[in-house]
Image (cartoon, grey):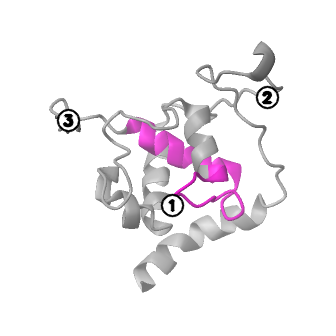
């Protein structure tokens, strides 16, 4: 436990310095069906760290420091929570959708980290998750008989 506290110290400084940032806009998902055919207004989120290896490494450290691996397993391969490394996404695998899941949380278990982490730290988590390469032989389960 002490190791995580020490590892989180640099990120606490990041949080304190950027705690005044406003919440990001909601994400417009292409797959949603809108009442009356009109989409509600939403912002487009773009990852400022997309493809940046240093940011991905920092995101990996955040993943461990904030106990994401407690649910999603080491390397994000899945445990109590789903795998984040297999290329399959319940709420969308685009950068904006992943940001939205981390920042605002999701039903049935995913807490909202937007009140704890500044947007830049969330983007670094997204960058880390996007850097993971799905296994070519990912196991699947058929639930039909």
Label 2 – label 1 distance at C-alpha: 25 Å
Please indicate, yes or no, whether residue 115 appears anywhere in the rendered image. yes
Q: Mark 3 points at which residue?
A: 142
Observer-nearest residue: 20 or 52? Answer: 20
Observer-nearest residue: 127 or 88? Answer: 88
Please indicate, yes or no, whether residue 38 appears anywhere in the rendered image. no
Residue at left 55%, top 40%?
Answer: 98
Q: How crowded is mark 1: few (under 14 residues within 10 Å), some or many (20 or more)?
A: few
Kindly check if marks 1 and 3 are in contact, taking CB atoms under 8 A apart as contact. no
The mark closer to the camera, 2 or 3, is 3
Q: Which of marks 1 and 3 is nearer the N terminus?
A: 1
Q: Name the residue under label 2.
A: 42
- Figure quadrant of residue 72: bottom left
Label 2 – label 3 distance at C-alpha: 36 Å
Instruction: Give the residues in magenta.
Output: 103-131
Kindly check if marks 2 and 1 are in contact, taking CB atoms under 8 A apart as contact. no
In the image, taking residue 50 as reference, residue 128 lies left or right, namely: left
Question: Is residue 105 magenta-colored?
Answer: yes
Q: Where does residue 60 sit, x and y in percent of width and height?
A: 42, 54
Q: Where does residue 42 sit, x and y in percent of width and height?
A: 79, 28
Judged from the image, the secondary structure of the residue bearing numbered disc 3 is loop
Q: Residues within 10 Å of mark 2 (few under 14, many from 20)?
A: few
Residue placed furthest toward the bottom: 2
Label 1 – label 3 distance at C-alpha: 24 Å
Q: Name the residue under label 1.
A: 109
């Amino acid at each position: 436990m002490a190791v995580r506290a020490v590892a989180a110290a640099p990120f606490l400084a990041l949080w304190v310095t950027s705690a005044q940032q406003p919440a990001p806009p909601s994400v417009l998902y292409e797959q949603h069906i809108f009442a009356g055919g009109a989409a509600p207004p939403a912002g487009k989120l773009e990852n400022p760290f997309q493809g940046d290896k240093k940011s991905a490494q920092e995101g990996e450290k955040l993943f461990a420091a904030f106990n994401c691996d407690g649910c999603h397993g080491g390397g994000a391969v899945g445990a109590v929570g789903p795998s984040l490394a297999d290329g399959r996404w319940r709420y969308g695998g685009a950068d904006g959708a992943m940001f939205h899941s981390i920042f605002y949380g999701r039903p049935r278990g995913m807490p909202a980290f937007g009140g704890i982490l500044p947007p830049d730290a969330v983007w670094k988590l997204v960058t880390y998750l996007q850097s993971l390469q799905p296994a070519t032989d990912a196991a699947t389960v058929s639930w039909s008989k």
